[in-house]
Image (spheres, rainbow, N blue to C red):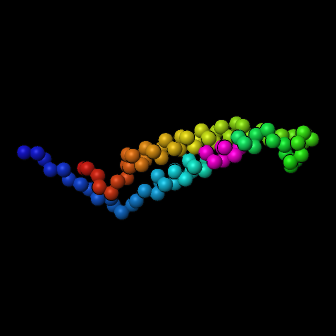
Amino acid sequence: MPIPVEYQRDDGHSFAWVKWTTSGAAIAAVGVGVYFLKLDGDGTCGRVVGNCPEVYDTDVLGYAAVGAGIALSGLTAYLFVRDPWKTDRRV
């Protein structure tokens, strides 16, 4: 005779916000990274082409932000698929 599976309800604490927060952070990080990559090499003194002595050097920040966004996207996918904080869990 099979043993019945019992379920345990959560104690009222919900961590569903974590997956939505990581999702928003991933989108924001990728957006910021793309912005920094677009900004890289542009002059710091407005739209005057060729006359600006300094340019933005934001490529490292851009790649780091995009990388962080990709990592957060992976974590978000895991949280949505696996969902370790389900309301019903097997005991």
- Asked if residue 85 is among those painted magenta in the image, a careful observer would answer no
Q: Residue at x 48, y 47 (%)?
A: 76
Q: Does residue 55 appear to the left or right of 36 in the view shown?
A: right
Residue at the right extreme, as displayed? 51
Height in image: 50 above or below 18? above
Q: Quadrant of the N terminus?
A: top left
Could you say where residue 71 lies in the image, as x and y percent from the top left? 54, 40
Left or right position of 77 against 5: right
Q: Give the side of residue 28 with respect to residue 58, left or right.
A: left
Image-quadrant location for residue 11: bottom left
Expressed as whole percent of the image width and height from the top left, the position of residue 34 reads: 66, 43
Depth order, front residue of 12/50: 50
Q: What residue is rendered at 45% in x and 45% in y? A: 77
10, 51: nearer the viewer? 51
Residue depicted at x 42% and y 49%: 80
In this picture, which residue range is highlighted in magenta? 30-36
Residue located farthest toward the bottom when viewing the structure as drawn: 12
The secondary structure making up most of the magenta span is helix
Q: Position of residue 70 (x, y in %)?
A: 55, 40
Q: How many marks?
A: 0
Q: Position of residue 40 (x, y in %)?
A: 76, 40
Name the outermost residue toward the left: 1
Q: Residue at x 39, y 46 (%)?
A: 81
